[in-house]
Amino acid sequence: MTLQDRREVTFLVLAGIFLGTMGMLNILGLTRFLHLGSIGSFPIIVAVGALPYPVTFLCTDLISEIWGERRASQVVWVGLMLNGWIVLVLWLGGILPGLDGFGGMAGLPADPQAEGVPVFFEVRRLAFGAVGASMAAYMAAQFTDVRLFHFWKRLSNGKALWLRNNGSTLISQIVDTSAVVLISHYAAHVLPIRPDEPVLPQLGVFIASGYVFKLVAALADTLPFYWLVGWLRGYLEVPGDGAELADAPPPGV
């Protein structure tokens, strides 16, 4: 395999993991909430769609580090289009007539949880809520991550790899988690909120739980990030500490 092939295949693998994870978390999204334990009396409650989400930031950080800000931004834009594609397929799947007797412009079920209604419509309802919330949060968080990554990189003159990896992710995750929870509740009404209790403390628990999970995941990926950057620089022959493929001469030159 030539050097150019290695560079292209590696980029496709990272972009594929990023985009596949985005598609998976938008469909699974809010279909189940997990109780991952407690910190004292504080419960850690995370939507199943959030489990693979930290991987997306690892992928964009690796692409940012090796290929540069422009390629990372391109992947983020493609991810946004993927969200739109998921919405389109789910919408078509609901309006087209089905063998189960549901579908068609006049045949949508009024209550997705009514007896006899296909599971698809409940998944569709939750996915619409998850995708709607994640599209707004996604744009804010992913572009914040990419911009901050390169801000810290310029500020440290390409040094302090841990700073741009963790600094960009931890700040962008605040944006992402807050936006997803607030939009999911106030715009889509898909969070399991207990109606007999105050709403804001419950939303605070969702935001804090999600952020704690992502904080731990971001800190845990620091060593793998260092190792992957070092290995990729050797495997893809990226010269210099902090250099990007955009600055490297073409193979054979």
Image (cartoon, rainbow, N blue to C red):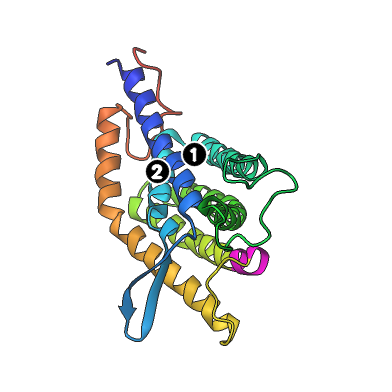
Magenta span has 186? yes
Q: Residue at x 44, y 56 (%)?
A: 49
The image shows a total of numbered marks equal to 2
The furthest residue to the right: 106
Placement of the N terminus among the 4 image quadrants: top left
Quadrant of the drawing holding the C terminus: top left
Dot 1 falls on a residue whose secondary structure is helix
Q: Nearer the viewer, residue 110 or 66?
A: 110
Q: In the image, which residues are magenta? A: 182-188
**Residue 81's image quarter?**
top right
Q: Amino acid at mark 2?
A: Cys
User: Is the magenta region chiefly helix, strand or loop?
Assistant: helix
Above or below, 19 against 195 in this view is: above
Q: Position of residue 43 (x, y in %)?
A: 38, 79
Q: Earlier in the sequence, mark 2 or mark 1?
A: 2
Asked which quadrant contains residue 36, the reply is: bottom left
Q: Is residue 13 left or right of residue 84?
A: left
Q: Is residue 200 left or right of residue 223?
A: right
Q: Amino acid at mark 1?
A: Ala
- The image's mark for residue 9 is none
Q: Nearer the viewer, mark 2 or mark 1?
A: 2
The residues bearing labels 2 and 1 have C-alpha atoms spaced at a distance of 9 Å
Place of residue 90 in the rendered image (x, y in percent of width and height, measured from the top left): 59, 44
According to the picture, the residue beneath numbered tag 2 turns out to be 59
The vertical placement of 174 against 122, above or below, is below
Q: Is residue 160 visible?
A: no
- Residue 22: give x, y in percent of width and height: 47, 46
In the picture of the structure, the residue carrying the numbered disc 1 is 72
Where disc 2 sits, the SS reads: helix
Residue 31, relative to residue 40: is it above or below? Answer: above
Q: Look at the image and say whether residue 72 sits in the magenta stretch.
A: no
